[in-house]
Amino acid sequence: MRLVFATHNTHKAIEVQKMVPDAFEIITLTDLNILDEIPETGQTLQANALIKARFIHQKLGYNCFADDTGLEVEALNGEPGVYSARYAGIAKNNEANITKLLNNLSTKENRRARFVTCICLFWLDEMFVFEGELKGTIIHEKIGTNGFGYDPVFVPDGYDITLAQMDLMTKNLISHRGKAFKKMAEFLLENKG
């Protein structure tokens, strides 16, 4: 069964495909040749996920979902939060975002942070929400080449390596996104009909 993921991010799509039941084939906007950049104008992660999922559901009528993820840093009053992808500007440049984050934390002792993922799923014309979080610490420099976004500077609680140093299977088991998608996958298994 095809399930549309309202994203152009192939990294996320690959991660998600490994998390959902085999009966579901994840299709991205790029796969459907939909080049629209859906504006993320919500003030919360859930609002942004809903905007993206609703746009695709109204445009195509398919079962679809969208997610939004934010990094919330205690010492920065929850920044970058809903602006995580465009923290350093609308270009959504991961390197620039990490540089800005590390600069803003350079004088801070408290480096506690958490990732939060919110998913909005349109399933049989009803909307469902799934959330996950991962707590950890922001380190002083990038380590690791796996993953994307802030992964090279985030060490999860209970680990001594960054998300960017983890293999994908381990990351999916513990990550905010993995937890949220596990909840969605359980829902899909129970409701696939």
Image: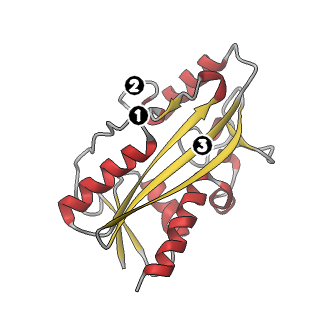
Residue 89 is labelled as 2
Q: Is residue 22 visible?
A: no
Circle 3 residues within 10 Å: few <14, some 14–19, many ≥20 = many
Instruction: Determine the residue positioned at 71% across, 17% down.
Output: 108
Q: Nearer the viewer, residue 46 or 10?
A: 46
Q: Secondary structure at mark 2?
A: loop
Is 54 located above or below residue 99 in the figure?
Answer: below
Per the model, the C-alpha gap separating discs 1 and 2 is 6 Å
Per the model, the C-alpha gap separating discs 2 and 3 is 20 Å
Q: Amino acid at mark 1?
A: Lys
Q: Secondary structure at mark 1?
A: loop
Residue 85: image location, x then y, percent:
45, 36
Q: Amino acid at mark 3?
A: Phe
Residue 92 is labelled as 1
Q: Earlier in the sequence, mark 3 or mark 1?
A: 1
Q: In the rendered structure, are the residues bearing label 1 and label 2 in contact, judged by CB atoms less than 8 Å apart?
A: yes
> Relative to residue 93, is residue 73 drawn left or right?
right
Instruction: Determine the residue positioned at 35% across, 29% down.
Output: 90
Q: Earlier in the sequence, mark 2 or mark 3?
A: 2
